[in-house]
Image (spheres, rainbow, N blue to C red):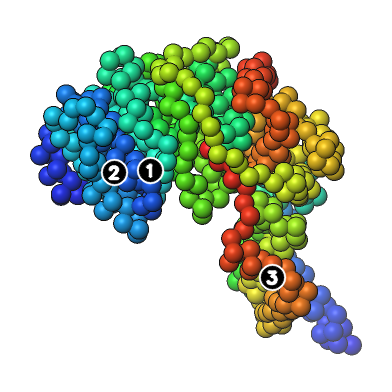
């Protein structure tokens, strides 16, 4: 009876206790690392925000329209504070990873390994999205101004279409980078983009026959122009 | 800054000429139709007024494909007796060369300055190759104040149609006058006289990769001369009649290059213009007379449409730097009919100063900023045309004078906002 009790209860408990005692330093160090991470994150946030404020990064962002982009994205925080907060969380995140790996649990290690292998993709996707957003904003505005100056009534539509198309392209590239629905997204983009072009062709072809005729006539016969010499 | 390396044959020609007293430069690009007349007028000017001087004519060409350079080489006055009582004693030298650098008038001028420097000339002039109203007297009027009057820069003064030169009349002249305090009526006239000393100064400036190499050259030459305390005067040249500018030239690009260069110069000379109050007239050489001018075709309705389209679509961009009062005004003006359409001088001055401040503070991309000015400029031009429909040339000049005064009076607005 005693033998059975030892084999069924005592030995597993003893084993668990031994493993727990062996694991305990790892757990304590992980908790400690987490607490240090929290503190370091907070400290980094404070120092970086202050430093960026001294370097007048907020004024620089205001001048270069970065603040406007943030406001349009629903972010009302100052860029210095935002950068500080982001970096603070990044520091905490790094400590979290170190703390998790210090646990030496094979399942967590495998998960972390996969996560680290995926991380560059996430980083590249964020960069693509950011550049895509800036480029779409810039190109959309350039197209809008150019079409207004050319006297095109549909200037607003042209500007928005250029902006949306470039951002869609960037979003497609970002999703492809992340490996999310790779083929589906490319096909969907091709269909949407091709569809827009086809719709425009049909619209211009059928709806704009007279306009096209008038335009070509003006071009061939010579458009009536103001004779003002501007310079 | 590196100078231009001349082609072998041009260097040989310069070595052959060695030194010269006077140089007249003609920039060109596909001007076969008019350049022959310009060259003959310059040659006659040399013969008639500078027969005792060594004169050189330089054609700086942008790669014409219509035989412009051949016409320059072959153009000659066949019968001097019909123009002059005496033949010129000294021959005129001619140099025709393609220019280097960014395609544009400024790059053509740079080559002319380089040749002037190489020949150590005393006085230079540049005249447009599309002029139909140039006479030999223009050469005398642009060169003599330099050779005999001790002036370094001679700006042109023309009689132009009341709707001609609208960028000059509504922006460049009033702004330059308010900034630098000199009443140069045609700061971007295109035909200038200047001393060899000033040509050498131009060459020391590193601006040939900017819009100065294009349409910005005229305002850059004028402002550089004033801001560096060179002696400046004006010469009355009569009527300015010329072929239409390059048909491919887009208004917004022209506006961007000219106004952009003016704003860039505001950065360069900000310490100078902030201290200047009011303005003073300049000595004007030449006998002034009235001239008949060709009528100009203007479609005001279309101009108002362009303005309204601009206000409808670009207000979001302008909101970033135009005062709220101006935005409200523009939104009201957008819906007005031709009979009621009017952009007052005060509003226009505030718009231009606000654009200058936005460019200085780099609030948005410079090209976007200045190209977005086009609909407002068209609206202002429409308003000016409507206002002066029945006005005589003198009345129009009075109206421009009134605008200049407002630019001068409101300069504090610019200075205060510039420094904030």
Q: Quadrant of the C terminus of chain B?
A: top right
Residue B123 quadrant: top left
Residue bearing mark 3: A212
- Labels 2, 1: front one: 1
Name the spot of residue A226 as percent of width and height, x first: 62, 47
Q: Chain of mark 2?
A: B
Residue bearing mark 2: B59
Badge 2 vs badge 1, beta-carbon distance below 8 Å: yes
Circle 1 residues within 10 Å: few <14, some 14–19, many ≥20: many
- Labels 3, 1: front one: 1
Mark 3: secondary structure? helix
**Spatial separation of the CA atoms under disc 2 and disc 3:** 43 Å
Left or right: B190, with B149 as reference point: right
Residue A147 quadrant: bottom right
**Spatial separation of the CA atoms under disc 2 and disc 1:** 9 Å
Q: Quadrant of the N terminus of chain B?
A: top left
Name the spot of residue B179 as percent of width and height, x first: 55, 20
Q: Chain of mark 1?
A: B
Q: Is residue B46 above or below residue B249?
A: above
Mark 2: secondary structure? strand
**Spatial separation of the CA atoms under disc 3 and disc 1:** 37 Å
Circle 3 residues within 10 Å: few <14, some 14–19, many ≥20: few
Q: Nearer the viewer, residue A94 or A119?
A: A119
* Residue at the (47%, 25%) spot, across then down: B157
């Amino acid at each position: 009876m005693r033998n059975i009790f030892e084999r069924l209860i005592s030995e597993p408990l003893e084993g668990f206790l031994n493993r727990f005692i062996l694991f305990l330093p790892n757990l304590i160090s992980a908790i400690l690392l987490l607490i240090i991470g929290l503190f370091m994150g907070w400290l980094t946030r404070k120092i970086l925000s202050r430093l960026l404020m001294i370097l007048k990064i907020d004024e620089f962002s205001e001048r270069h329209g970065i603040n406007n982009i943030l406001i349009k994205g629903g972010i009302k925080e100052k860029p210095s504070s935002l950068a500080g907060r982001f970096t603070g969380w990044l520091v905490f995140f790094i400590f979290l990873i170190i703390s998790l790996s210090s646990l030496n649990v094979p399942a967590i290690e495998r998960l972390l390994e996969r996560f680290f292998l995926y991380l560059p993709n996430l980083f590249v996707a964020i960069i693509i999205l950011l550049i895509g957003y800036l480029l779409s904003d810039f190109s959309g505005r350039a197209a809008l101004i150019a079409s207004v100056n050319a006297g095109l009534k549909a200037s607003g539509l042209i500007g928005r279409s250029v902006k949306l198309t470039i951002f869609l392209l960037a979003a497609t590239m970002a999703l492809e980078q992340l490996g999310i629905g790779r083929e589906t997204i490319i096909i969907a983009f091709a269909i949407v983009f091709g569809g827009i072009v086809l719709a425009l062709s049909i619209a211009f072809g059928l709806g704009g026959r007279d306009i096209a005729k008038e335009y070509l006539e003006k071009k061939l016969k010579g458009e009536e122009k103001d004779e003002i010499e501007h310079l | 800054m590196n100078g231009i390396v001349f082609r072998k044959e041009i260097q040989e020609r310069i070595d052959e000429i060695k030194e010269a007293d006077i140089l007249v430069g003609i920039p060109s690009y596909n001007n076969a139709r008019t350049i022959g007349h310009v060259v003959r007028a310059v040659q006659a000017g040399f013969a008639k007024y500078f027969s005792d001087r060594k004169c050189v004519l330089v054609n700086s060409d942008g790669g014409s494909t219509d035989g412009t350079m051949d016409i320059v080489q072959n153009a000659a006055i066949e019968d001097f007796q019909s123009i002059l009582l005496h033949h010129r004693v000294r021959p005129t030298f001619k140099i025709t060369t393609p220019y280097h650098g960014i395609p544009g008038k400024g790059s053509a001028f740079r080559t002319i300055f380089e040749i002037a420097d190489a020949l150590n000339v005393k006085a230079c002039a540049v005249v447009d190759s599309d002029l139909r109203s140039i006479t030999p007297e223009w050469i005398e009027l642009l060169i003599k104040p330099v050779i005999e009057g001790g002036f370094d820069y001679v700006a042109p003064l023309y009689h132009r149609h009341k709707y001609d030169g609208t960028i000059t009349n509504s922006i460049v002249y009033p702004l330059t006058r308010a900034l630098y305090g000199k009443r140069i009526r045609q700061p971007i006239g295109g035909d200038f006289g200047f001393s060899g000393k000033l040509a050498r100064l131009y060459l020391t400036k590193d601006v040939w990769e900017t819009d100065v190499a294009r349409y910005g050259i005229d305002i850059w030459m004028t402002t550089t001369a004033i801001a560096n305390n060179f002696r400046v005067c004006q010469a009355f040249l009569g009527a300015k009649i010329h072929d239409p500018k390059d048909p491919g030239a887009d208004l917004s690009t022209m506006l961007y290059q000219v106004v952009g260069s003016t704003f860039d110069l505001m950065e360069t000379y900000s310490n100078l213009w902030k201290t200047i109050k009011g303005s003073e007239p300049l000595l004007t050489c030449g006998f002034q007379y009235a001239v008949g001018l060709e009528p100009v075709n203007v479609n005001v309705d279309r101009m108002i449409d362009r303005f309204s389209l601009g206000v409808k679509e670009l207000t979001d961009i302008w909101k970033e730097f135009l005062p709220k009062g101006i935005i409200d005004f523009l939104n009201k003006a957008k819906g007005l009919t031709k009979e009621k359409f009017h952009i007052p001088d005060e509003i226009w001055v505030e718009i231009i100063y606000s654009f200058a401040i936005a460019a200085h503070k780099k609030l948005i991309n410079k090209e976007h900023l200045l190209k977005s000015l086009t609909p407002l400029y068209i609206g202002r031009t429409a308003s000016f045309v409507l206002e002066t429909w029945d006005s005589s040339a003198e009345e129009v000049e009075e109206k421009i004078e009134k605008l200049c005064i407002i630019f001068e009076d409101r300069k504090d607005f610019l200075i205060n906002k510039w420094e904030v």
